[in-house]
Image (cartoon, coloured by chain):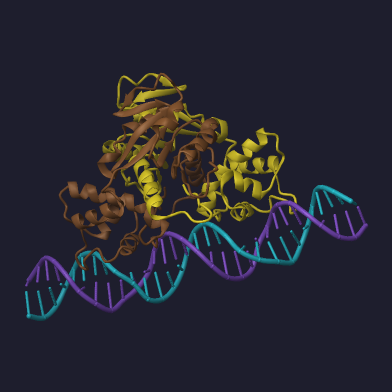
Chain colours: A yellow, B brown, C purple, D cyan
DNA sequence: CAACAATTGTGAAATTAATCACGACATTCT
DNA sequence: AGAATGTCGTGATTAATTTCACAATTGTTG
């Protein structure tokens, strides 16, 4: 909606900044420099200043940034003023971990409902979230645009098709499958096995030099 | 230890390629083109060819790549020939999800042991992995260089210090905390709340155009 | 109030990654 | 065998991101 001039790399760091600013605020700090923030979030201070600068001049030279002001600004920018509802598909161990995570605290995101193939799990609550049988997807899931997918890979393609028909626009995919979706749907993949193997590969082939660069 | 000329972006994709090649092999396919692979893993075919080319000429012009040959090559490159042992710290829902995941199948990575603060969980097995109390970290965890950290943020800093003393070299960190570690230790962060919020942000501010670009 | 210290915001440079586009060669077809 | 087709490997280009480095400005101190 806004000026989508903000680089993707910057956009990905915004939630991170937001949470640490929140921490600082709770600690009663009213002022912070890019250097301090850098040490906390492990992002180069020049990168932080550059990131902030895309939104205009948010700080004061020789002083730093006012925590409360910055927080207020990012709250608006990150749409923290209105709650975003999401659905969770697949109530296994990973899915259950999400149900216990309190996204409301910092993120203003709410898991509104969950689905599972297991009839025994249906009609229960976990962490206050109602769980339905997957057969009821079409009747229960209205108005939800974002889903978290924590199901076995074998079911991914089928469920994804149904989600697309329901009109969702974003998927956070924890399945190893690379989903095929229409172009107007955004999929972010988090592949746990790939992440672990990549870490192992880096450790063996990229001896860390002076300053260890931390990725994600 | 090899030529560390391979771009990091390429290195991160290797595990992904490896798994899909494995799938193809199981399906009995003996030949694959960069175009086919591209459709499966959702990475541009030119990028795939470029990635492969860092390792030399692995394919044949006008033909494509021999699946079995490529697999064998990557098996060596990704050190799939020897098992990598890792430890899991924190047997909550997320940790348990890892314990049930079979990393041996494709990755030749084995979770050798797990630790938790809960005494009730100790001395049990989950998915064949022994669970110890966290107090026994120093006595039980020998020779392990990589850990998966799935504990509450509040405990992260303390446990990390102990892990560092134990001589680990890599951490896959699911904690929201940004860990402070010596420069010779590599930390990969996977922050579930950040990932979810970033997805929501992208959906609201980056209307997808023609070709949907898929990130992770 | 002047000197000092701190810190931003940003051009410019450097680095890293993705993409284009095409010559060369292997395979397959007729 | 010759023509047509498919596909790789890569030089060159473009795009994205990070980092350097410093003038400008503010707050602080004596």
Task: Name the residue rendered at 61%, 48% in the picture.
Answer: A38
Q: Position of residue B159 (x, y in %)?
A: 50, 33
> Percent x, y for residue A152?
30, 35
Q: Count the marks.
A: 0
| Drawn side of residue A147 relative to residue C29, left or right | right
Residue A91: x and y, percent? Answer: 36, 28
Q: Is residue A113 visible?
A: no
In the image: residue B198, left or right of residue A58: left
Q: Residue at x 54, y 47 (%)?
A: A13
Q: Quadrant of residue A174?
A: top left
**Above or below, comparing residue A173 to residue A34 in the picture:** above
A125 is higher (above) or lower (below) than A90? above
User: Foreground residue, A176 or B6?
Assistant: B6
Q: Residue furthest front?
A: B139
Give residue B178's position: percent from left, percent from top. 54, 41
Task: Looking at the picture, tell me which residue is in the foreground, B59 or A92.
Answer: B59
Return the residue nearer the eye: B29 or A160. B29
Quadrant of the rendered image containing residue B145: top left
Where residue B9 sits, quadrant-wise, is bottom left
């Amino acid at each position: 909606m806004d000026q989508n001039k903000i680089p993707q790399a910057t956009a990905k760091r915004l939630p991170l900044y937001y949470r640490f600013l929140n921490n600082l605020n709770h600690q009663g700090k009213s002022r912070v420099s890019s250097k301090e923030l850098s040490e906390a979030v492990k992002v180069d201070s020049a990168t932080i200043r550059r990131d902030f600068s895309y939104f205009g001049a948010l700080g004061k030279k020789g002083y730093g940034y006012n925590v409360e002001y910055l927080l207020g600004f990012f709250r608006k920018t990150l749409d923290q003023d209105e709650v975003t509802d999401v659905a969770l598909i697949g109530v296994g161990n990973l899915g259950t971990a999400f149900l216990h995570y309190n996204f409301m605290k910092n993120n203003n995101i709410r898991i509104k409902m969950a689905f599972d193939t297991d009839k025994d799990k249906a009609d229960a609550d976990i962490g206050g979230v109602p769980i339905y049988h997957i057969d009821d997807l079409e009747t229960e899931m209205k108005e939800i645009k974002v889903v978290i997918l924590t199901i076995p890979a074998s079911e991914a393609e089928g469920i994804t098709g149904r989600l697309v028909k329901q009109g969702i626009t974003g998927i956070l995919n924890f399945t190893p499958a690379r989903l095929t979706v229409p172009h107007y749907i955004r999929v972010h993949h988090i592949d746990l096995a790939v992440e672990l193997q990549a870490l192992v590969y880096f450790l063996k082939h990229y001896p860390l030099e002076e300053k260890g660069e931390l990725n994600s």
